[in-house]
């Protein structure tokens, strides 16, 4: 069942993105018949008529009742006409005079409005892509990415993109289904971020969100098919109200889950939850107003502008992600800034060179041509040097904190050899690794007999691990860090770094996932590997020294047999 739902959602998003691309590639003009309707029991009553429009020229007036043909094409054309669409209606009664209307091109939307809609659409899809890319293995991140992708694709679909009025019904179904899917995904995100306590209300709601989403999609299908295919306004209105109630309830429950998470959070987590709560609260407020106004028949055009509150969702999420480190996307910004900086430097140098050349040398002369070719060659050969300098500078700016943490880990790895007691060595190693790398937990394992035992651990439970464990075997064989999750191991951490001493696995440093749930960067893995190696060697040296001290003390005892004393002295002299 879970696989079927995942395939359905994937196909829905893929088809929606295809329609979004088609909408961008073929921007269709909207049509206009020049009237607005107020649904009624006996036909549709004309609420307003635009002067000079096809409706005005046909003699239609506010207050007239019209009866639309009982066809899918006619019903779709009333809601989403294209220029040239021909609509035939009966005036005042079902068998009244026929009036033919041909849609004209609707006045263009203000350029500012188009810019806002386009930016909103791309902002949703951009944040969705980043979240899915960086945290695809996190259920909460997947729910957030699905919500953003569904809303972004829904906003991006042009209802007028299909020329055939009958097929123009497909974008209606897609958009409504995407918004229903987006609402359910927002609820799933609210119930799973931060991770809910087991057997709590949020945890049970998170498990129920697939069924809740399926109900919403079915309601969207039902009210659209009832209105457009079957043409039953009474049932369609009842289903629409049911759908609106479902949608508003889902959004309100999601906001309630965010409020509950905010009330139980503390510290930095509470600040992050406050921003997420404000982001979704403001973003959904306009959507709820539009839904309610549509359900009660309030058709004022300005009510649609409440939908622009959704712009606050990608803006607020982007700010929260960058400012409060829900995701670490510094590397994305790093690459963008590097290439932008290199482009600015190269273009700036080229413009400066051209300006100097124009003021110092006659244009068109052989000297000017030679200098231009030489300057272009030098500039081209210097791009690598410019790139390395800009890259180094930007890397220092964006990853200063990470580099400082790595440097601290490497520095302690060198200092570990000077610690004089095993307990302090083990405790400080775990403390440095966990605090500097922002790990959720860390453990120092050492070999004792045929098992590896945690000498110090911040995991909830750190049991001894047999030497034949899959992860242990891989570290003993290949001397590299392993992910216990991929090895069917009894270890509960994210990565285990081996402590190789004289070719044997003396122990390992087990690291839990990072507090930010980000993957370990290559330089972070390297620093932790160095720490594990040096700490393992230091622990082995301390153990040897302890044995030496014990043997020396034993050899100094007065009642020790002479032959045993001689053997101990010879053994100590071989150090």
Image (tube, rainbow, N blue to C red):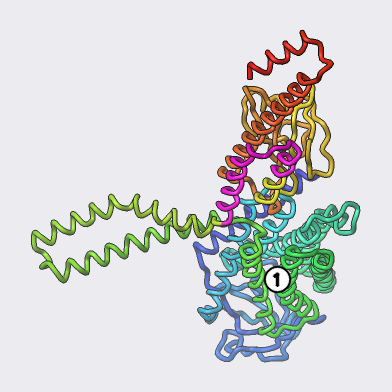
Question: Residue 131's spot in the image, x, y percent?
Answer: 64, 55
At 12% from the left and 67% from the top, the residue drawn is 361
Question: Residue 279's spot in the image, x, y percent?
Answer: 70, 71
Which residue is label 1 attached to?
279
Q: Is residue 305 above or below residue 182?
A: below
Q: Nearer the viewer, residue 525 or 45?
A: 525
Indicate yes or no whether the magenta region holds residue 407. Answer: yes
At 66% from the left and 64% from the top, the residue drawn is 324
Question: Residue 306's spot in the image, x, y percent?
Answer: 68, 79
Residue numbers of the magenta segment = 401-429
At 41% from the left and 57% from the top, the residue drawn is 390
Q: Nearer the viewer, residue 253 or 437?
A: 437
Q: Nearer the viewer, residue 162 or 240?
A: 240
Q: Is residue 485 above or below residue 474?
A: below
Question: Residue 360's spot in the image, x, y percent?
Answer: 14, 69
Figure quadrant of residue 472: top right
State the residue lying farthest toward the left. Answer: 366
């Amino acid at each position: 069942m879970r696989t079927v739902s995942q395939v359905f959602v994937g196909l829905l998003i893929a088809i929606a993105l295809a329609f979004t691309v088609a909408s961008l590639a073929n921007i269709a003009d909207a049509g206009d018949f020049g009237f607005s309707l107020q649904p009624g029991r006996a036909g549709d009553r004309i609420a307003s008529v635009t002067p000079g429009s096809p409706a005005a020229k046909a003699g239609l007036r506010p207050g007239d009742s019209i009866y639309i043909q009982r066809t899918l094409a006619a019903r779709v054309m009333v809601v989403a006409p294209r220029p040239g669409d021909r609509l035939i209606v009966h005036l005042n009664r079902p068998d009244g005079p026929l009036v033919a209307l041909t849609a004209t091109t609707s006045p263009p939307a203000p350029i500012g409005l188009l810019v806002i809609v386009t930016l909103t659409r791309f902002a949703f899809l951009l944040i969705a892509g980043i979240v899915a890319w960086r945290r695809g293995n996190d259920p909460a991140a997947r729910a957030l990415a699905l919500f953003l992708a569904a809303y972004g694709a829904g906003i991006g679909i042009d209802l007028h993109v299909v020329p055939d009025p009958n097929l123009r019904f497909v974008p209606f179904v897609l958009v409504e289904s995407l918004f229903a899917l987006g609402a359910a995904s927002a609820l799933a995100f609210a119930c799973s971020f931060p991770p809910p306590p087991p057997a709590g209300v949020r945890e049970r709601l998170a498990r129920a969100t697939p069924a809740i989403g399926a109900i919403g999609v079915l309601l969207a299908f039902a009210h659209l098919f009832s209105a457009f295919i079957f043409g039953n306004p009474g049932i369609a209105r009842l289903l629409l109200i049911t759908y609106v109630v479902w949608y508003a309830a889902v959004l309100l429950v999601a906001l309630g889950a965010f409020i509950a998470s905010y009330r139980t959070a503390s510290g930095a987590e509470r600040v992050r939850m406050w921003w997420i709560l404000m982001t979704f609260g403001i973003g959904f407020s306009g959507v709820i107003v539009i839904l309610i106004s549509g359900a009660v028949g309030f058709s004022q055009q300005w009510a649609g502008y409440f939908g622009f509150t959704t712009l606050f969702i990608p803006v607020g999420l982007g700010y929260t992600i960058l400012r409060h480190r829900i995701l670490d996307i510094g590397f994305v910004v790093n690459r963008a800034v590097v290439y932008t900086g290199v482009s600015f430097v190269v273009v700036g140098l080229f413009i400066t060179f051209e300006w100097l050349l124009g003021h110092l040398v006659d244009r068109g002369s052989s000297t000017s041509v030679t200098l231009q070719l030489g300057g272009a060659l030098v500039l081209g050969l210097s791009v690598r040097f410019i790139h390395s300098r800009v890259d180094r500078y930007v890397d220092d700016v964006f990853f200063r904190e990470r580099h400082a943490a790595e440097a601290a880990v490497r520095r302690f790895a060198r200092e570990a050899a000077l610690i004089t007691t095993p307990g302090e060595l083990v405790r400080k190693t775990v403390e440095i690794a966990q605090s500097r790398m922002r790990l959720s937990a860390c453990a120092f394992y050492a070999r004792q007999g045929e098992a590896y035992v945690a000498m110090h651990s911040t995991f909830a439970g750190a049991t001894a691990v047999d030497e034949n464990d899959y992860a242990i075997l891989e570290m003993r064989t290949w001397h590299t860090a392993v992910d216990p999750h991929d090895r069917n191991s009894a270890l509960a951490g994210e990565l285990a770094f081996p402590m190789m001493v004289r070719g044997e696995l003396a122990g390992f440093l087990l690291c839990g996932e990072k507090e930010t749930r980000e993957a370990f960067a290559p330089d972070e893995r390297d620093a932790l590997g160095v720490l594990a190696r040096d700490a393992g060697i230091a622990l082995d040296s301390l153990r040897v020294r302890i044995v030496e001290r014990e043997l020396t003390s034993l050899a100094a005892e007065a009642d020790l047999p002479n032959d045993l004393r001689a053997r101990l002295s010879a053994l100590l002299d071989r150090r």
